[in-house]
Amino acid sequence: MKNWKLKEIVVMSVLSVVFAVVYLAFLPVGKVLVGFFGPIGYDFIFGIWFIVSIIAAYIIRKPGAAFLSETIAATVEVLLGNAVGPMLIISGMIQGLGAESAFAITRYRSYTLPTLIFAGMMAGVFSFAWGYFQSGFAALAGGYVLLMFITRVLSGALLAGVAGKLLSDALAKTGVLSGFALGKEKRKKHVA
Amino acid sequence: MYLNNVNPSVKALTILALVLILALLFDPVTPVLFTMFTVLITFLFGRFRKKYYLFYFLPFTIFAFGMFWTTIAFADPPQNPAETIVLLGWEVPEENVLVALSLSFRVMAFATLSLLFMFTTNMVEFLLSLMQQLRLPPKLAYGIMAGYRFLPMLKTEFDQIRAAHRVRGVGTESKWKRSRRFAVPLLAGAIRKAERTALAMESKGFTGSRERTFYRNLKVRGKDWLFPAGMGAVLLFFIIFSVRFGYFSWYQGQL
C-alpha cells in the first residue's frame, strides 16, 4: 500500500462502488437467464462480475489493484444488500485473486489485450472452482458442469477482458486518466 | 440496543465464521432453525427501521425458492432412486429434495445473517474498527470511505447526464447503446471527482500513515464477546438437536 498514491486508492474505491451497483443490477438479469436455461444462466454473463478488477488493474497498474477493487466491490454489494450474503465477499476475493494471478504471472509488466483476456479467464477459473465447492455444482450432471465451466471462462474473457479494455480506453480518450498509468501510456504513444 | 453497539469487527468476523460453518452443513433442519433465531435476535436486539427489513428480505425468499427448484431439476442421479416424494404432482427422489431444501435454507440463513449486519452496523464505524482492530491501512480505509460517499451522488449525476442528453435531442436508440452513452460520462465524472477528493484530503494533511490519532476510538470490550459466544452456542445447540433427532448431515462429498 506504500507505493500507492492516495488518488489511485480513491479512484479505485470509486470504481469499485460504481461497479458494485452495476453488479447488483445484473443479478436480476442473471436470475432471468437462470429461469430460462437453468444454473448455466449465470455463466453467460458471469464475466460482468469480474470487470472492475480488469479495469482497475489496467488503469492503475499496481500489484493488488485487481484483488482490492473486486473485494471492495463485493463488500459494498453486501452493505447495499443482496441475496447472496456475506459469502459474496469471499467470492469477490477469490475472483479478484484469479484476475490478480494473471497480472502477477506477467510480473505486472504486461497490460496488453491478451493479458487482460487471460486475467478475465483466470477470474472465471478461480470463481468456478469456488462455486463448485460452495454452490454444490457436483450435485449437477458432469457434462452440464463442464459446459458451465467453458461458458464462464469465455464470458470472463469477453465481458471482463475485452469489454473492460474497451471501456477503459474510452475513458482514457476523455482525458480524465492523464494522471494514471493508462493515461500516461496513451500520451506517450501520442507524442511518439 | 445491543447489536448496534457490538464492535463491528467482532460482529463481522463472527458472521463470517458462522457462514463458513453453515456452508459445511447439509441438512435442512439446522439452517431453518438458525434462520428463525437470527431474525428473532435481529428484531429483539437491533435498532433499525423495521418495515425496511421485509423489503430487503423478500428478494431473498425468491432467490431461495429459485435455488430449490433448480437444484431438483438439474440434480445428479440419486443414490436411492426408489425413495421418492410427490411434489406438486411430480415424483422426485427424496435425496434430491433434502439437498435442495438444505441448500435453499442455507441461502436464507446467509441472508438473515447479512441483514443482521447490514441493519445494525454503521459503515463509518465499520471502517474505523477495521483500521483500529484489524490494522487495515488508513490510506485504504479513508479512500474507501470517500468512495462510498459517492454513491448518493451517482444518482444526481445520472439524472444530470440524462437531462443534458435530452436537451440535445438524444435518446431514441436501443437500451444497450443507451447504457454505453451513460457509462463513459458517468465514470469520467466520478474519476474526476475522486481525484479532486484525494487532492483535498492531502492538502488537509492526510498522510495515510498508521501513526495517527482518531476522534473516535473503538475498542473491543468484554460484552462484545457475548455476541460470538451466544451465536456460536445456539448454532452448536441446533446442531446437537438435529443430530439427536437424526436429521443431521455433514459434508460428505455431496459437492
Image: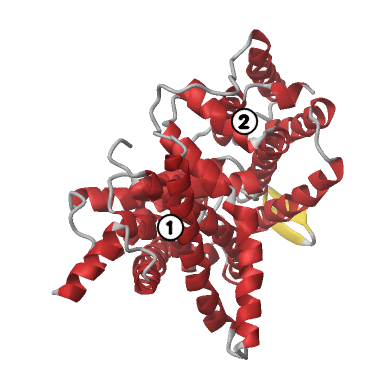
At a point 49% along the width and 38% down the height, the residue shown is: B142
In the displayed structure, would residue A27 be above or below residue A136?
Answer: below
Residue A52 shows which numbered tag? 1
Q: Is mark 2 on a helix, strand or loop?
A: helix
* Outermost residue to the left: A192
- Report, in whole angstroms, how far the alpha carbon at label 1 lies from the one at label 2: 26 Å
| Element at label 1 | helix
The residue shown at (60%, 89%) is B168
Residue furthest to the right in view is B51
Give x and y (percent) for residue A176: 39, 65
Q: Position of residue B162 (x, y in %)?
A: 63, 77
Which is nearer the eye, B42 or B195?
A: B195
Mark 2 packing: few (<14 Cα in 10 Å), some, or many (20+)?
some
The residue most toward the top is B222
Relative to the observer, which residue lies in front, A15 or A36? Answer: A15
The mark closer to the camera, 1 or 2, is 2
Residue at the image point whose x is 48% and y is 36% from the top: B141
Tell me the number on the disc at residue A29. Answer: none
* The label number, if any, that marks residue B125 in the structure image: 2
Q: Which chain carries label 2?
A: B
Height in image: A192 above or below B47?
below
Residue type marked 1: Val
* Amino acid type of the residue that numbered disc 2 sits on in the rendered structure: Glu
